[in-house]
């Protein structure tokens, strides 16, 4: 693990793969730590010669927690934001994109391929639009433009995401609640309650259980609002969009909207995939990304963690 100061925020990072390989910045989604990236997924990028940089977003894992910065109730914030009200969230996705750029700066990486999943895909869009000179290519998985006209998550999933954290939950209760959510959003018929998922959820809990953080991250998504005109349409980097056909949290229309708003983007719909990266689809997804990185100018940019 490597701890850096990025955008004035303590950020925990993990670097894997050949030290002189082209850098790939991997941005995780809402409420998930860097250890939630499957090893065989980022390992496939490492085996292809790429140096992956995984990191904990602010308010999660081992990165800085914004203690005392209260997040608004999303049931109030969402309609308020749609009515044009801003400034209710402690921070926005723009701040989180600055963190990501700060990670590159701290590691002395001038330019990187960027891979973002879910909320991380939104952060990646902001980053690519605001700092195009730092982005070799963009890969966006199971994400969205935050366009308010897009289909929304199913009602039971939205309720689960917006529910306040249980203040007195035991470890077992917290893990059961997380498992229930993943059973709703994950790919069906691949063992949404399989041992790998259980182990990853348990490892995440034991590494850093911090319920207030995801609440503020959700507020950041709502605060930032529609990405299209301010960010997505300004992206110049070669872009690959990957989305599951059965994603109930971020319906595939979100991936299609990203694709339609970025010139020359490529869209891959994975039939049967939900809002996760299940084992049976990892070789295909990793292969698509490796191909995209290699055809997007993989000039050597070494990572210096000194």
Image (cartoon, helix red, strand yellow):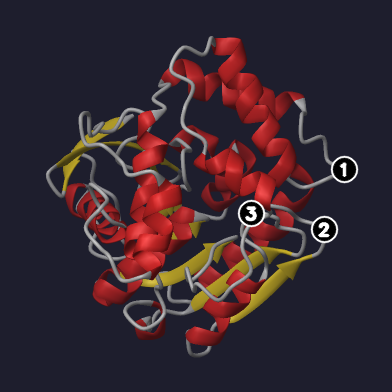
The image shows residue 166 at horizontal and vertical percentages of 49, 21
Q: Are marks 2 and 1 in contact (CB under 8 Å)?
A: yes
Label 2 belongs to which residue?
272
Residue 151: x and y in percent read: 64, 69
Residue tagged 1: 189
Q: Can you name the residue that lies furthest to the right here?
A: 189
Of the two numbered discs 2 and 3 on the same chain, state the one appearing first in sequence: 3
Q: Of discs 1 and 3, which sits in the foreground?
A: 3
- In three-dimensional space, the C-alpha distance between marks 1 and 3, rounded to whole angstroms, equals 17 Å
Name the quarter where the C terminus is drawn: top left
The reply to whether dot 2 and dot 3 touch (C-beta < 8 Å) is no
Please, which residue is most extreme toward the bottom here? 263
Q: Is residue 8 above or below residue 302?
A: above
Query: Which residue does the image show at 87% across and 43% down from the upper left?
Result: 189
The secondary structure type at the circle numbered 1 is: loop
* Residue pointed to by mark 3: 249
Residue at 70% x, 55% y: name it.
Answer: 248
Quadrant of the frame with the N terminus = top left
State whether residue 244 appears in this view: yes
Q: Is residue 115 above or below residue 206?
A: below
**Is the residue 8 above or below the residue 251 in the image?**
above
Count of numbered badges drawn on the protein:
3
Where disc 3 sits, the SS reads: loop
Say whether residue 103 is left or right of residue 49: left
Dot label at residue 83: none
Image marks 1 and 3: residues in contact by CB distance under 8 Å: no
Residue shown at 51% from the left, 66% from the top = 139
Residue 87 placed where, x, y %? Answer: 21, 58
């Amino acid at each position: 693990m490597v701890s850096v100061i990025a955008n004035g925020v303590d950020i925990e990072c993990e670097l894997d793969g050949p030290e002189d390989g082209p850098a790939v910045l991997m941005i995780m989604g809402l409420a998930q730590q860097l250890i939630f990236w499957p090893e065989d997924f980022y390992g496939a990028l490492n085996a292809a010669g790429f140096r992956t940089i995984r990191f904990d977003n602010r308010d999660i894992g081992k990165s800085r927690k914004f203690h005392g910065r209260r997040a608004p109730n999303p049931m109030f914030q969402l309609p308020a934001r749609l009515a044009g009200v801003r400034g209710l969230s402690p921070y926005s996705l723009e701040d989180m994109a600055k963190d990501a750029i700060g990670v590159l700066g701290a590691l002395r990486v001038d330019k990187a391929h960027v891979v973002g999943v879910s909320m991380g895909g939104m952060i990646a869009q902001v980053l690519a639009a605001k700092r195009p000179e730092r982005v070799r290519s963009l890969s966006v998985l199971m994400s969205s433009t935050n366009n308010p006209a897009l289909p929304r998550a199913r009602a039971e999933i939205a309720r689960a995401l917006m529910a306040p954290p249980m203040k007195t939950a035991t470890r077992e209760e917290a893990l059961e609640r997380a498992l229930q959510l993943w059973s709703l959003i994950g790919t069906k018929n691949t063992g949404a309650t399989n041992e790998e998922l259980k182990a990853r959820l348990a490892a995440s809990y034991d590494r850093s259980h911090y319920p207030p953080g995801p609440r503020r991250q959700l507020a950041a998504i709502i605060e930032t609002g529609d990405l299209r005109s301010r960010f997505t349409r300004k992206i110049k980097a070669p872009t690959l969009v990957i989305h599951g056909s059965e994603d109930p949290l971020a319906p595939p229309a979100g991936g299609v909207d990203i694709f339609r708003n970025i010139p020359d983007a490529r869209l891959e719909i994975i039939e049967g995939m939900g809002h996760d990266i299940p084992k049976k689809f990892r070789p295909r997804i990793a292969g698509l990304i490796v191909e995209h990185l290699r055809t997007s100018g993989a000039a050597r940019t070494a990572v210096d963690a000194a």
